[in-house]
Image (cartoon, helix red, strand yellow):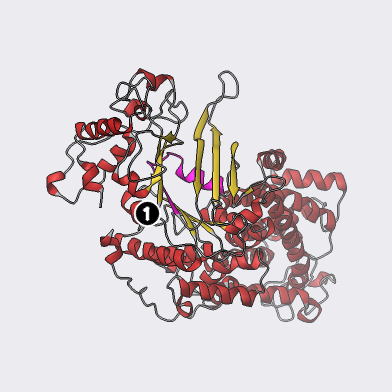
Amino acid sequence: MSGVRAIVPLDRRDRGGPAQPLLLVRDLKKHFPGNGRLFGRAREIVQAVDGVSFSLAKGATLGVVGESGCGKSTTARLLLHLIEPDAGEIIFDGDGVGEPQGISVRDLRLQMQMVFQDSYSSLNPRATIADIIAFGPRTVKHLRPDRARERAERLLDQVGLRPSLFARRYPHELSGGQRQRVNIARALALEPRLLILDEAVSALDKSVEAQILNLLVELRREWALTYIFISHDLNVVRHISDRVVVMYLGRIVEAGAAAAIFGRPLHPYTQALLRAMPSMDPDRRSTEPPLSGDPPNPINPPSGCRFRPRCAFAEEICAHSSPKLEASPRLDPIGGDHEVACHMMVPGSGHSRASASADGLRSREALSALQAGEGGARAEGVGR
Amino acid sequence: MADIAAVQRIAAPEVAEGIAPRGYWRTVAGRVRRDRLTVTAGAILLAIVLLAIFAPWAATHDPLQGDILHRLEPVGTPGHLLGTDETGRDIWSRLVYGGRLSLFCGLSPVLLATIIGGVLGLLAGMGGRLLNSLIMRICDVFYAFPSVLLAIAICGVIGAGIANTILSLTVVFIPPLVRVTESLTRQVRSRDFVEAARASAAPLHAIIRHQILPNVLGGMLVYATSLVGISIILSAGLSFLGLGVTPPAAEWGLMLNALRQAIFVEPTVAALPGVAIVITSLCFNLLSDGLRSAMDVKLPS
């Protein structure tokens, strides 16, 4: 599943060429004002998304994982400008979003669509399935009602729902899986190039989830789509993604090829997440919770590294400076651009587990020792 | 993940061929037609409206011409089927003619207030915090007065007359309608499907028309129709105080007030204008209830 896929046919809307990432995000920030008092103390600020950067190649699928409340969904909404970002750049196929020479938010939304988690509340309960799908083509592309309807029926067919059976139904008459198919059809109705799937399969039964995932893989090929796949389900993310970013409390802590992230996780948080996946092997059952406690309150995030209070390796340096997301010199042999935000991975950072020099070989040994040392034979168990 | 990929695509379960007609509003119309109570209420209302419109043909006597020798005749008197009032005027004819003014005074303030209050409520619900506060706080000012008092005060300032009665009642009904619409709009706009519509780059007017309105209109209609009865009674009250319709014109509220002195002499006749008001507002309430459940397509019809 992972790895670089075949060359994507060039879209007629393509502007930057195949080498230009479809989406470039730089230092995206959103701080929500909390319920502070009007007088007296300063208002509290929730740092929902705090400096997120990534790039997404055309035709690739980016998996975004992390616990609830880590800013995954906020990031998705920021990308579509459903929430206005406080700071940061979004560059879609070479065009800055909302910039004078760039692309307008409206034009961005025509090329970037989203599928929501809650399949029921994301469909208008008082509209027929055909009207729901035809809404975009009718009001945005100004298609005649009968043409929009035709398109809706074609899309229904493509997502595996017989138009004659479903076009005139209402959302409450459909099952969860069928509703999510409608949601996908609705998102595709504007012929986007990028589809954000925000926990799109999380609320479905396992068998239905597999059907929808297969449908997504199929559509990705047929429509030459690029996906941002947000989920807390690591198995699913691994199944569908080329690249994965791991988020913790509004920041990206690790990014890299899916094989690299799952094969050789570098950040202690990623390692803990992977250990939290149930093992199929009874001899490898996890007896201790790899992570305890809840993520800290994003209103007052811990200083320095945000994972520090829950990290087994936290030292003084972690409280003082926050690690930057960068390619570790302890380069992973599997992935090329494996980035991690952890002091342990930066030689000379002051952390006792970081090697003093950038000697690749030695640090790799140190790394495997480190991974073995915390009882995580998991790394081998995870690789395929 | 072979285990995921290996699961065969199971065909979507077959559902019996739907008989649901195209489009939301046609579905609603079909559901209303199947609801016997609503259809009955609608038919009675239609009859009342038709009688009022065609009053010159439906009436048996001149509604203003009294016969002093036949005052307060009981119900069933030959020539005066529903009796006569305190000056000997035919009750049936007065009820039929009175329907014109009563329905007009009852319906038009509600209709105007629904349009104005609905627009303001949608604006407050969809707009930002500033616009919302502005509209809602102004409404709060009107809430500070009891509705009858407010209507009397407005009528007292701008003068008596039917037009002024309607105007003052409209002002009275706008704030509650703004409030109902605003809270419904707020509920709907926070749902995912509105966000999905925003994400599809649809213009705001299309979102309001296709996503918000169908989900807000039901609640608004139910509330507005419940005001019709109140509106008829309030306008009658204003007439009683000499601020609305003036005697000898036939109007249900005015008739009720005039006949109230005869309640011990001829109770059935005295109650008749009240019966007309009750039947009319009851039918409006039943109709609105039926409309609401027909618009909630989740409920089985």
Screen quadrant of the N terminus of chain B: bottom left
* Residue A29 image-quadrant placement: top right
Determine the residue located farthest toward the left in the rendered image.
Answer: A283
- Residue at the spot x=83%, y=53% of the render? B164
Q: Secondary structure at mark 1?
A: loop
Q: Is residue B267 above or below residue A302?
A: below
- Residue at the spot x=76%, y=49% of the render? B171
* Residue A255 image-quadrant placement: top left
Is residue A78 found inside the magenta-colored segment of the image?
A: yes
Boundaries of the magenta span: A61-79
Q: Tell me residue B90's x, y (percent).
A: 77, 73
Q: Which residue is mark 1?
A: A202
Q: Is residue A256 left or right of residue A23?
A: left
- Residue at the spot x=79%, y=70% of the render? B89
Q: Is residue A81 above or below residue A216?
A: above
Q: Is residue A151 left or right of residue B91?
A: left
Residue kind at label 1, given as amino acid type: Ser
Q: Chain of mark 1?
A: A
Q: Is residue A104 above or below residue B79?
A: above
Q: Tell me residue A35's x, y (percent).
A: 53, 30
Is residue A254 found inside the magenta-colored segment of the image?
A: no
Camera-side residue of A238 and A328: A328
Q: Tell me residue B294's x, y (percent).
A: 53, 69
